[in-house]
Amino acid sequence: MVTLLFTSWRTDSWPSYALTLLACVLASAFYQYLEYVRYRVRRGRKPREGTAEEPFLLRSKGAGMVGKIAGGVLFGLSSALGYLLMLAVMSFNGGVFLAVILGLTVGYLVFRGEDDDQTAGLNSTCACA
């Protein structure tokens, strides 16, 4: 069937292939979630109407460094996952390709669809996002 990312990750039956595709969908959706969280950490939480809510992770003095560290960790995780997804797609398996695209689409609709106008200028670690 397919060998994905590592020689030890080899599918030998339809159920193992289906689980591999499910893992690709979940990893892709999780990538979109990480990008959403990274955006919120970087830009701050959007205040609700009539409230003066402080930015996310910047609620106390000295928390700016915590926000920078959190943003850096999220960037690293997002980059690593993005490159792993790219390598998975480069296995040249149509099912893996479709699973990654499906996961990115579902993740975008669930986590980032409402903030499209605001996240359009955010640097992305993966060209497919």
Image (cartoon, rainbow, N blue to C red):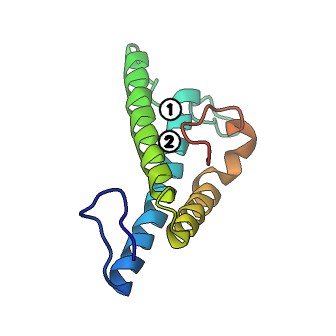
Q: Is residue 79 left or right of residue 128?
A: left
Image location of residue 39, percent across then percent down: 56, 36
- Identified at 64% across, 59% down, the residue is 109
Q: Which residue is mark 2?
A: 37
Q: Would you call the spot at circle 1 few (<14 residues within 10 Å), some (14-19), or many (20 or more)?
A: many
In the displayed structure, would residue 109 be above or below residue 41? Answer: below
Instruction: Say which quarter of the image contains residue 118.
Output: top right
Image location of residue 75, percent across then percent down: 45, 33
**Residue 54 visible within the image:** no
Q: Residue furthest left?
A: 8
Image location of residue 99, percent across then percent down: 53, 68
In the displayed structure, would residue 107 be above or below residue 38? Answer: below
Q: Residue furthest top?
A: 62
Q: Which residue is mark 1?
A: 41
Q: State how many labels appear.
A: 2
Instruction: Say which quarter of the image contains residue 61.
Output: top left
Q: Residue furthest bottom?
A: 14
Which quarter of the rendering shows the N terminus? Answer: bottom left
Q: Would you call the spot at circle 2 few (<14 residues within 10 Å), some (14-19), or many (20 or more)?
A: many
Residue type marked 2 = Val
Q: Residue furthest right?
A: 117
Q: Which mark is residue 118?
A: none
In the displayed structure, would residue 72 be above or below residue 118? Answer: above
Q: How far apart are the alpha carbons under marks 1 and 2? A: 6 Å
Q: Do labels 1 and 2 touch, CB within 8 Å?
A: yes
The residue closer to the viewer here, 94 or 55, is: 94
Residue type marked 1 = Val
